[in-house]
């Protein structure tokens, strides 16, 4: 596809960092699927982000832990790219007391403020209004943080999208609205639920820059994110990025994912962005086969450690039901 | 034994029969048409193929627009069923339900009314966490002009849903998802179960247990366990939460002198509070013990399985509540 | 201002009909103000539409009683243009048993299905989703009715606007979204609450035609409405019309209306559309001074009769509280 | 006599003092800045001039975005006040309140919390009709993680609002508009009234009347009327509806043996149901009569003045309820 922005080539170090994030996400996904098949960790629900790894992997090259991320149920790729520790992530998925949320939130509500993972919501559209609030705090404190709100193509039709982009533009909030357009919403194809050909074009309704890019193209995504982050940090206001991508594993575990036309999905799988980037890194001489294999081994170990950490962690005590309900416990 | 069907089949059958009987019945909801898989858990499978994707419309993810469209169509003679995938998502369409659907009959002085049914799934037990399984039926029961219905068996689901679709008021029809695939006796095609009437499921003499929806299971199990201790509990299935069948409740409690209300919703400010208050207002002098309530613990639905189970009402908690009325 | 559409000159008969509707609305407004000052009818709340008369007066030249209208608290101009009987209207405002809604709904909820006045809402944005439903029923029955949803400029920022236009476009519903842009929302100027210069441009987000016209120009408004109604009747789908106008009397009775810049309001009052149309009718020879004076006398009598009808009508009995709550009375 | 102020002045003062004391306090709402008139009824007048239009921001008419912005800012140390003009408009922002603000502390395992205050006006009596004056506080009391507060005097409004703003949980602060301009003793600058604590407004021995917000007026009048008949009623001002002060209620009722709960919200499934149920659960054997409830009639708020008055709880209906507990 053609990108709306002029693509700048990221330095090799950035491409390597993007690959490391993307590979970590991909390997983590495989491990989650494995754990769910074996069932031994007791992971109860999972929305796979396979196919969408490059988007947050490239975005986060421009963010630090101080920047805020608000994501959705399908958000583990965003969370990992943003730097959430895998041990606590796995423990949360496994419902353990050592999880990011003590096992109380679970996959749809993973939270880890230390890495800037502020909110994960299970409500379509719920991430955008909250992102504005985080950005409003940054604007008032002039702390130069950037907030990114992730959401899907289907979410671009719900009221919260409209209200949030309107407010962010009026107030020039340092926020990026990142629509990960995987061409489907649960089982409804993009064009059937969305009355515009390009979500990015909706930015015009808010006098806001809107760019559509191939989210699976590391350079294009990296460049679009770079511009949007720079704009936000400079206090020039919000940007809407529509990152085109593809959902490889269905809506959630067990989804037959039958909604694709002849060949659509096959073609997308053909273009699996993670191995593609790996090839490119070697072809362009940014990394050797050996170096990448070593990196991947490191990632495998990281994940095995996280799995074991979760496995060996205690389950939350039932008394936790009464904790974290109100400040200082229920009155 | 009679043929068995689960909730999914019974609800699908009810919608199928209603659409076959009345061309004004239509369904709006996310992913409901067969092109979108016939519903995320297949409750609407086959309906768009039978009645057309015009009458069984997959919608964008826009609950306010879905419910508003149902309200508008209902104003001019349609009998729309708006499927709101999960009860927590009603929060996105609250304005259309509360400020419009429930009130237009009164505010128009009876010139218009809204014969719409909102079907919604919910119920904890599947590990979905805090935003997907709430029971907030009490909110809608607190709104004049609404009817709130919650079946506890496939046959009830069929008969009550048929009545909701044919009812001239906005009805909220609450379906419990974790028990969706539980079998029960198949409904007689075409049966209607009247709204506003409860059912005495098992007769008893020592205490009345009043429940609805999924917790009829825990309550039924409690009745069995109690009978083994020689306690005879009468079990009432409320079926309609608003307006609820006070008469049947009072008849039972004036006999048993004791009552326990059981529901999945959190206890404080829940449906049980209203029922407890009404029973006490009417039968104060006859009651042998204060009405007891059993509901989920007062917190968001937790993810971890052990916590989720402890959060929900259990057979044991129902039995304990009954014991409190007997001691 | 310049109009987006090519303005067609309405026939003199239409201009006359438009004037009659506009004059009725204007005289009714004066009478409502008078009644509220005197207080004798007990009208408790009123949102004056003065300055916006031409919009519905021109629109309704293309509608019949069979067409549906959904309007808002500031909707008496729409209701009168759509043909609501003044007697029942006045009785409703006066809270009488003979009112359209038996005095139970009041000014913000005036309803009169016989004239196609289906819903009046007090909730900003509430009119649009319901309009889609009315149009959906018409589409299913192929009854060729058109539904018009009226709302203000401020309402174009709320979620219901976005969700409704998206759905209407996807389904090609026979609905017209009529934004009466009076440049202010309660006390907030248009540009302060709306992140786009022209509401009409938001139509692009829904692949829908959007036209901005001078709503106070009878020919321009008449032409825009004609095209939109024709498009809807032909089953070609919805249209967004942004009708530019001005709010002459503040948000509601007693509003000091201090939010205008030096001269803005004066200039608008200068261009009061109702006397302007009257002048034009005579200048273009569509009507004589005498004929118009006679018409206006007729309107005065109509309104006096309505006032007396309300005055002499009984108040609703307290037993009405329990009526119209549920079908066949509360169970 | 002490200086008098009305609710508008007291609420304005509370926000002014809170903003002066804590730079993290900010206000978001429609028409609230002085450029927009300082609030539709001037509750926020002067605040944007004193603290800047950045901290006192007029917003578009987008309740979901307003509340969401408050939630987000609260997550990172701000203490936002979201003004939702009227309580019925909360329906537009329900998702952010219920699924997010109330639950984020629990769902994050305590890593984050939402110290946000939602101020909203409501209350029938002005002829606004069915969509502008509902009392739906019971909905929010039914949601774990929320606090719900409703003042009955200007001084209470000041002290309770200051506490809400400083509280670390999402608070819903309900203001009664028809009595907005009613005077009361001026609050002592800087006083806080603790959340979760009720006030015994007038001591009595024969019956306990429990109310809050606007119906404290009707209840107070009833206390006077009853005293002339020799009935000594103890009047409790709940102040905080969730979590409410059960201790103070039980202390009083175990003395008087009789209780009446009064509120403007419609009776069925309202706050009175929970209070009635709790009192009965705790004091069943001591009660001399069933707890009585007085609320608005169960219908949308009507426009016609005679209907609106008959809809609302009156002093007479409170007196009648008390008589029922004495007979
Ligand atoms: C308000 C609301 N409505 C419906 C749902 C159910 N639901 C969960 S995910 C989903 C599809 C969302 O699609 P999209 O926004 O494209 O995100 P994706 O899952 O493709 O990443 C739906 C309808 C929900 N979670 N929230
Ligand atoms: C959801 C909602 N929020 C707030 C209000 C309060 N309110 C009533 S009218 C109004 C301004 C609406 O402005 P606009 O849409 O431009 O319509 P106009 O009054 O100018 O015709 C507001 C904020 C409301 N009625 N509904
Ligand atoms: Mg998608
Ligand atoms: Mg306006």
Image (tube, coloured by chain):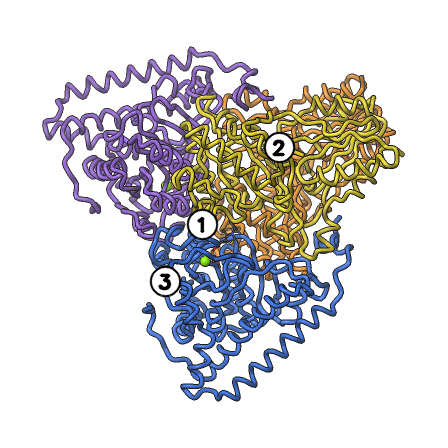
Chain colours: A purple, B orange, C blue, D yellow
Ligand 2 within 8 Å of the CB at mark 3 = no
For label 2, the residue is D156
Mark 3 nearby-residue class (10 Å; few <14, some 14–19, many ≥20):
many
Pointer 1 and pointer 2 on the same chain: yes
Q: Vertical placement of C149 versus A327: above or below?
A: below
Place of residue B175 in the rendered image (x, y in percent of width and height, measured from the top left): 60, 38
Q: In the rendered structure, find residue C210 and report the number of the disc placed on it.
A: 3
Report which quarter residue B291 is drawn in.
top right
> In the image shown, does B64 or B163 lie closer to the viewer?
B64
Query: Which of disc 2 and disc 1 is earlier in sequence?
Result: 1
For label 1, the residue is D36
Q: Vertical placement of A101 versus C103: above or below?
A: above
Place of residue C313 in the rendered image (x, y in percent of width and height, measured from the top left): 74, 68
Q: Is residue A39 left or right of residue C74?
A: left
Mark 1 nearby-residue class (10 Å; few <14, some 14–19, many ≥20):
many
Task: Name the residue: 48% across, 77% down.
Answer: C18
**Dot 3: element:** strand
């Amino acid at each position: 596809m053609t990108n709306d922005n002029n693509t700048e080539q990221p330095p090799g170090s950035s491409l390597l960092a993007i690959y490391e994030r993307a590979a970590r996400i991909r390997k983590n996904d495989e491990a989650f699927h494995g754990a769910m098949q074996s069932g031994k960790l007791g992971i109860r629900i999972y929305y796979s982000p396979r196919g969408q790894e490059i988007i947050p992997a490239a975005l986060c090259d421009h963010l630090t832990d101080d920047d805020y991320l608000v994501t959705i149920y399908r958000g583990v790729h965003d969370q990992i790219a943003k730097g959430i520790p895998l041990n606590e992530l796995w423990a949360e998925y496994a419902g353990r007391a050592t999880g990011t949320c003590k096992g109380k939130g679970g996959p749809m509500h993973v939270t880890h403020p230390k890495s800037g993972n502020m909110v994960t919501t299970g409500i379509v559209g719920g991430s955008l209004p909250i992102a504005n609030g985080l950005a409003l705090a940054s604007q008032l404190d002039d702390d130069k943080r950037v907030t990114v709100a992730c959401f899907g193509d289907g979410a671009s039709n719900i009221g919260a999208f409209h209200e949030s982009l309107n407010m962010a533009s009026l107030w020039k909030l340092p926020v990026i609205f990142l629509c990960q357009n995987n061409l489907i919403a649960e089982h409804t194809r993009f064009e059937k639920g969305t009355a515009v050909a390009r979500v990015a074009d909706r930015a015009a309704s808010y006098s806001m820059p809107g760019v559509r890019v191939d989210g699976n193209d590391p350079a294009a995504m990296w460049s679009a994110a770079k511009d949007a982050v720079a704009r936000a940090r400079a206090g020039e206001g919000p940007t809407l990025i529509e990152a085109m991508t593809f959902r490889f594993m269905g809506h959630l575990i067990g989804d037959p994912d039958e909604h694709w036309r002849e060949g659509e999905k096959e073609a997308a799988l053909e273009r699996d962005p993670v191995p593609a980037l790996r090839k490119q890194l070697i072809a362009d001489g940014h990394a050797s086969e050996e170096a990448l294999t070593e990196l991947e081994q490191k990632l495998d170990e990281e994940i095995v450690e996280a799995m074991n950490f979760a496995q060996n962690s205690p389950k939350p005590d039932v008394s936790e039901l009464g904790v974290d309900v109100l400040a200082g416990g229920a009155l | 034994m009679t043929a068995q069907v689960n909730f999914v089949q019974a609800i699908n059958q009810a919608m199928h029969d209603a659409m076959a009987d009345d061309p004004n019945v239509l369904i709006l909801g996310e992913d409901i048409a067969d092109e979108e898989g016939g519903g995320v858990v297949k409750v609407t499978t086959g309906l768009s193929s039978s009645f057309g994707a015009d009458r069984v419309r997959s919608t964008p993810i826009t609950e306010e627009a879905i419910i508003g469209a149902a309200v508008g169509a209902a104003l001019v003679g349609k009998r729309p069923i708006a499927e709101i995938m999960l009860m927590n998502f009603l929060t996105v369409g609250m304005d259309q339900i509360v400020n419009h659907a429930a009130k237009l009959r009164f505010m128009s002085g009876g010139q218009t009314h809204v014969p719409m049914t909102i079907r919604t799934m919910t119920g904890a037990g599947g590990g979905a966490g805090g935003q997907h399984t709430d029971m907030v039926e009490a909110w809608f029961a607190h709104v004049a002009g609404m009817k709130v219905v919650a079946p506890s068996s496939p046959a009830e689901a069929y008969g009550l849903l048929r009545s909701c679709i044919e009812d001239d008021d906005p009805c909220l029809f609450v379906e419990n998802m974790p028990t969706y695939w539980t079998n029960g006796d198949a409904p007689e095609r075409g049966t209607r179960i009247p709204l506003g009437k409860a059912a005495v499921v098992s007769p008893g003499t020592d205490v009345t247990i009043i429940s609805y929806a999924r917790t009829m299971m825990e309550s039924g199990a409690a009745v069995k366990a109690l009978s083994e201790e020689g306690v005879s509990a009468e079990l009432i299935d409320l079926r309609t939460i608003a307006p609820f069948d006070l008469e049947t409740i009072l008849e039972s409690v004036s006999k048993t002198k004791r009552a326990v209300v059981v529901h999945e919703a959190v206890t404080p400010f829940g449906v049980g509070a209203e029922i407890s208050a009404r029973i006490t207002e009417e039968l104060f002098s006859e009651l042998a013990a204060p009405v007891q309530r059993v509901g989920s613990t007062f917190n968001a639905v937790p993810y971890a399985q052990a916590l989720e189970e402890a959060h929900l009402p259990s057979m044991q908690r129902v039995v304990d509540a009954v014991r409190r009325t007997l001691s």
